[in-house]
Image: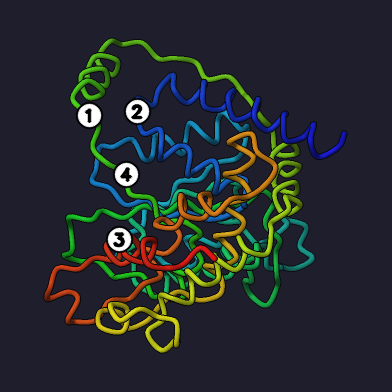
Amino acid sequence: MDDLEKAQDLLRAKEKVTQELRKIIIGQEEVIENLFIALLCNGHCLFVGVPGLAKTLLMRALAQVLNLKFSRIQFTPDLMPSDITGTEILYDDGTGEGRSFRFIKGPIFSNIILADEINRTPPKTQAALLQAMQEKQVTVGGSTYDLSPPFLVFATQNPIEHEGTYPLPEAQLDRFMFIINVPYPSFDQEVEIALSTTSGEHPKLEIALNAEEIQNFQDLIPRVPVSDHVAQYAVRLTQATRPDNDTAPDFIKEWVDWGAGPRASQYLLLGAKAKALLDNRTTVAISDIKSIASQTLEHRIILNFKAEAENITPLDIVEKLLSSVKEK
């Protein structure tokens, strides 16, 4: 099967997955679209939204539709790194020949990890995810264990509670491909949600894809060609977020402490490739870069005190960049 045929299979697969998710997820079309792009790019996501917006339900349903192993980790102040990665225990085999240590795998050994309220646990435990997210491996007791592909971390944050929270360090934020803001439903959607969730009916989800098919689609994304001017635009956009860069606009130097690193340029290109294929195109356009710019750059822009005093947000910065960075 050539790449063009695989691209058509991808469109059909996306339609099947979306159709199944719509059985229990009402609205949130943009959230699902971004989630599917991240899945194809093998990228982790940070979801930000108030409680009750079906974030957990969406992740669990996605794992079920994709026939992947799912683990939900509730992050709390007393959570230890070993609660995530697993631990070694002293094991007696009962034969009298002695004891030995045996590694008991933690919930990180799944395909889709829901790190619920990740900012509620201290940095030491947050850091337990770093190696897994970047290298797809876990090291415990001097031994390294591979994580089965596909491996994706979907973390959630509650934006309205700040007591007892630990902001994610920039190094960990940079490992998330996207930050996805989950909005409130519209009036009609909320009426439909209220009716469907109180009807007593429980729609059955069908499996639409499996792990092997997902990996084949993930392998397809890097092979999508990108013209030089599109790649250069992605890098110009990323470099323009850095206040010490000569090409940075004046408002960046005025409001931003730190901008996005090279990983942002990589994710902009990967995400744009996936977006093009999902729109039934085999060439990447600058509009694809722009469509995923906010979710790729927002969490990588660190504002200074002046910006905060003037109520400037990272999203404001991205919007100004999209209108000021030249396409050619």
- Residue bearing mark 3: 315
Measuring from the top left, give residue 284's x and y in whole percent: 63, 50
What SS does tag 4 mark?
loop
Label located before the other in sequence (4 or 3): 4
Could you classify mark 2 by the number of other residues whose Cα lies within 10 Å: few (under 14), some (14-19), or many (20 or more)? some
| For discs 3 and 1, the disc positioned in front in the rendered view | 3
- Residue bearing mark 1: 186
Q: Is residue 216 above or below residue 168?
A: above
Q: Quadrant of the C terminus?
A: bottom right
- Residue bearing mark 4: 182
What SS does tag 3 mark?
helix
What SS does tag 1 mark?
loop
Q: Amino acid at mark 4?
A: Val
The front one of 181 and 132 is 181
- Give me the C-alpha separation between circle 4 and circle 2: 11 Å
The dot on residue 27 is 2
